[in-house]
Amino acid sequence: MYSPLNTASTLLRDISALFLPDLCLLCNRPLEAGETYVCPRCWASLTVFPDRTARPYRALRGELEWLWIGWAYEARVRRIIHLLKYDRRPEVADLLVREWLRAIPHLDAVKEMDLLLPVPIHPARRRWRGVNQSERLAEALGRALDLPVEYEAVRLVNTPSQTLLSRPERFRSLEGAFRLPSAPVFRGKRVAVVDDLATSGATLAELARRLREAGAAGVSAAVMTSPETGLS
Ligand SMILES: [Zn+2]
């Protein structure tokens, strides 16, 4: 709500931000020179995903060669991921990927991939949101590991919020949701699907199915976090 007092305090905060050091997003301590958004102590204190073996979800057994998950699904990790959605600077994605790769076990296997595929979002949602954070992540991961990124996959169905659906409904709602390019870009390639978050794994399963149909030699996935701990 507008009030002269609120406006004055916002102005004061903006002015003081010009002179005071940036604060860590998570602990509010002042950042040192060369640190951005999150201090090294907070990065180091994030809980890595419980299953360090990085095996696929039980529901996805046989669907993915590898599933890399960076951190446990906790409030601090979600705040960091929000940066991707609301701060459009590319260095945000590079910073997140640098720390994400430190958290991911079996990093060598990520480097063996031929191609990265960000999970596509529906064009309507992209217009509304302005950015596909999965693309930003895949680009930064590609820069870090020197891997190409494929952008041409299309999401045909603007699926409802997955949180309202039961597990079988999630898997059903995504059938036929994606279209892959007709050119043989995936044939014989080992592909890693990239996303910020995996919930039921339904999206990854559907994309993996389509990629195998398109001739991919193997499909893996890398996500920053997941609330799902039922890994086998
Ligand atoms: Zn901190």
Image (spheres, grey):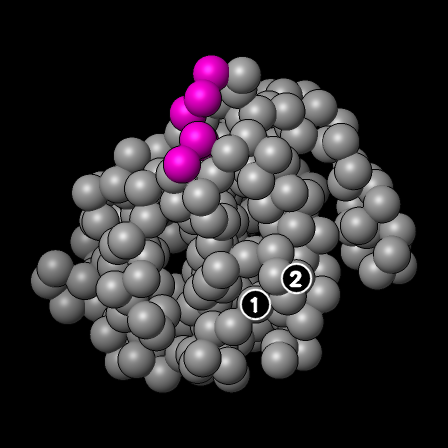
Residue at (51%, 34%) from the top-left corner?
A: 215
**Visible in this render: residue 154?**
yes
Q: Is residue 171 magenta?
A: no
Instruction: Say which quarter of the image contains residue 88.
Output: top left
- The reply, left or right, for residue 49 in relation to residue 205 is left
Residue at (55%, 37%) from the top-left corner?
A: 211
Q: Amino acid at mark 2?
A: Leu
Residue that sits furthest to the top in the current view: 183
- The reply, left or right, for residue 189 in relation to residue 133 is left
Which label sits on residue 60? 2
Disc 1 is placed on an element classified as loop
Q: Position of residue 149 (x, y in %)?
A: 35, 33
- The reply, left or right, for residue 181 in relation to residue 151 is right
Q: Is residue 185 magenta?
A: yes
Instruction: Say which quarter of the image contains residue 100.
Output: bottom left
Residue tagged by mark 1?
56
Residue at (47%, 54%) from the top-left corner?
A: 220
Q: Is residue 203 above or below residue 54?
A: above
Task: Read off the magenta span.
Answer: 183-188
Closer to the camera in the image, 57 or 96: 57
Q: Position of residue 19 (x, y in %)?
A: 19, 53
Closer to the camera in the image, 103 or 39: 103
Residue at (68%, 71%) from the top-left corner?
A: 58
Q: Is mark 2 within 8 Å of ligand 1?
A: no
Distance (Cα) linking label 2 and label 1: 6 Å
Q: Position of residue 147 (x, y in %)?
A: 26, 41
Asked if marks 2 and 1 touch (Cβ < 8 Å), the reply is yes
Q: Is residue 114 above or below residue 202?
A: above
Density class for disc 2 (Cα within 10 Å; few <14, some 14-19, many ≥20) is some
